[in-house]
Image: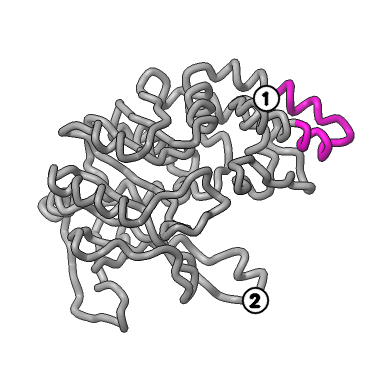
Amino acid sequence: MAMANLPHFVQYQGSKRNLATYILQFLPKKINRLVEPFAGTAAISVAASANQISHNFWLNDLNQPLIKLLELAIENPNEIADFYSKLWNEQHTDSIAHYFEVRSKFNQTNDEKLFLYLLARCVKGSVRYNSRGLFNQSPDKRRKGTRPETMRKNIAGVSNLLKGKCQFTSLDYREVLDGSQDGDFIYMDPPYQGVCGNRDSRYLSGINFDDFVLAIEQLNQKEATFAVSYDGKLGNKAFGKFLPSSLNLERIEIEVGRSSQSTLLGKAETTVESLYLSPSLFRSLSSVREFNYTDKKIGNSPKQLTLLEKHGEFAAATR
């Protein structure tokens, strides 16, 4: 299945849907089980299933309504599609008031079925929480959210790829890492804004940077195979701290593309995201793929790396 045609029922901010085609190039060709401690909407698991890289998945997210929504969509797609259709059609003429009514009810109940409507209807698919952990994003006034027939099709597509193959939990990521087994591949996409104690409204809960580094050290001690999407930059502006070199991870820079927001402001800025590969993963890749390092370095930027793939040439960077 072509990556561009992969089903996703919500445009969740921070989803790695558009990067999945690149990230999967660094995964083993076959995985016993793919573990996502920060699953979000499971974009990497959807892509891995479509490409038959793995047939077993552990999807975890501390955001309980989100993981419950994911489970419902995968295991009971008609139930959630029917509910969404009914709720969407109740918008009538005052869709803004309807949205705020649904948002208020969701914050009282944490009902995952209501959450789907909010995610489909809110501004830019961008989740926001206030200091009390309540969902407070506004509705997109230009549209009324994904049409029910499109939503049903996308939910069915995700369900077809993952139904009966997943374990769903809402645990602290460290519990998931402790529960990982030999043969698992762990893909981590944690929130990296606010990791030093400053709250980030995009996430229900952040993570402590030092705790995360310690967790990775423990994974290295177990010789676990994993990859981490962590920091990035827009133009010359960096987001998030680099993971320390003492972890012996290989850092790949993936160009996401030109920022549409920057373009609107008359700036030519490119978004770049980092992917860190565990030592065991990089060793396995090096043994089966051809890497060509150059000696050129520009300032403090990572050393350039060219990864030659049978599907074409993919340029990235590492340090």
Relative to 41, does residue 56 appear above or below in the rendering?
above
Q: Which residue is mark 1?
A: 84
Q: Quadrant of the N terminus?
A: top left
Q: Which stretch appears magenta?
A: 84-101
Identify the residue shown where x is 40% and y is 41%: 38
The quarter of the picture where residue 119 lies is: top right
Q: Residue 301 in the image: x percent, y percent? A: 31, 76
Q: Nearer the viewer, residue 254 or 114?
A: 114
Q: Looking at this rendering, what residue extends furthest in the bottom direction? A: 299
> Which residue is disc 2 drawn over?
266
Q: Nearer the viewer, mark 2 or mark 1?
A: 1
What is the quadrant of residue 172 in the picture? top left
Position of the C terminus by quadrant: bottom left
Residue 159 picture location, percent across and down: 47, 24
Q: Is residue 171 visible?
A: yes
Question: Which residue is more in the foreground, 158 or 120?
Answer: 120
